[in-house]
Amino acid sequence: MNLVIAIDGPAASGKGTLARRLADYYHLPHLDTGLTYRAVAHMLLAKGWSLDDEAAAVEAAGLVDLGGMDREALSAHAVGEAASRVAVFPEVRRILVDKQRGFARRAGGAVLDGRDIGTVVCPDADVKLYVTASAEVRASRRLRDIEGRGGQARLADILADINRRDERDTGRADSPLRPAPDAHLLDTSEMSIEAAFLAARTIVDGVLAARSDA
């Protein structure tokens, strides 16, 4: 069985958690493609290079190792903010998309989540999911996550940040965030993680059943 699952959606929509659950359930490798952009941003910040220096960002993108990304280090808020800035550079996106496509071509398939998986990285994916939720719900989730790790933040600030990132992601000229025409929409605003997982599983199992019957 070769199964590629593409999951897209805005920040804090729950797509990462869903992707990890699906990857575990179907025994597939998982790639959070957002980490690749965070890795570029982290490298620029660590070297003291400007986030507006496209040549430096391109150099950093070429050095990104998909097997060596430290999720803990790359999860910092400042890195996420910086990542959304370097992600607008077309050549950075081209380099990272090539790496991401290589990951998706693994024998047996893979689960990838990000902003342009179903539309750009894996347009021929077997299953495409677009996971979303209201900005207010996503801000509340992000606040709970921050507080759960012992941090502090203001809900209003998080909401403003999410709205800014949404605007950047949907408004960029190269690979904007949008659902693929054949993506299954999952609005998780009123869903628990378990409910979202079961809904996604139903979609994937339906695709696999149709393939078996073909």
Image (tube, rainbow, N blue to C red):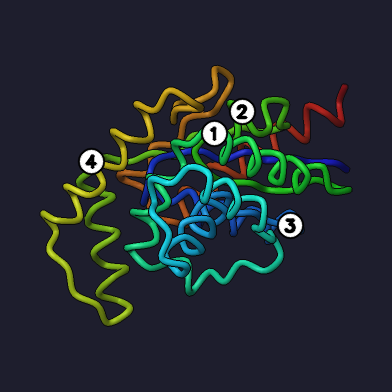
Q: Between disc 3 and disc 4, whose residue precedes? A: 3
Q: Residues within 10 Å of mark 2 (few under 14, many from 20)?
A: some
Write down the residue under mark 3: 29
Horizontal side of residue 205 vs 157, given as left or right: right
Q: Between disc 3 and disc 1, whose residue precedes? A: 3
Write down the residue under mark 1: 116
Q: Quadrant of residue 154?
A: bottom left
Measured Cα–Cα span from mark 2 to mark 1: 5 Å
Tell me the element at label 1.
Answer: loop
Q: Between disc 3 and disc 2, whose residue precedes? A: 3
Picture residue at 64% right of the left edge, 58% below the top? 64
Write down the residue under mark 4: 163
Residue 193: x and y, percent? 44, 56
Q: Between disc 1 and disc 4, whose residue precedes? A: 1
Measured Cα–Cα span from mark 3 to mark 4: 31 Å
Measured Cα–Cα span from mark 3 to mark 1: 18 Å
Tell me the element at label 2.
Answer: helix
Residue 130: x and y, percent? 49, 34
Horizontal side of residue 13 vs 129, given as left or right: left
Q: Residues within 10 Å of mark 1 (few under 14, many from 20)?
A: many
Tell me the element at label 3.
Answer: loop
Mark 2 and 1 residues: CB-CB less than 8 Å, in contact?
yes
Measured Cα–Cα span from mark 2 to mark 4: 23 Å
Measured Cα–Cα span from mark 1 to mark 4: 18 Å
Mark 3 and 1 residues: CB-CB less than 8 Å, in contact?
no
Write down the residue under mark 2: 120
Q: Residues within 10 Å of mark 3 (few under 14, many from 20)?
A: some
**Residue most toward the bottom?**
150
Identify residue type, mark 4: Asn
Decide which of 24, 145 is in the foreground and name it: 145
Picture residue at 18% right of the left edge, 49% below the top? 159
Decide which of 111, 64 is in the foreground and name it: 64
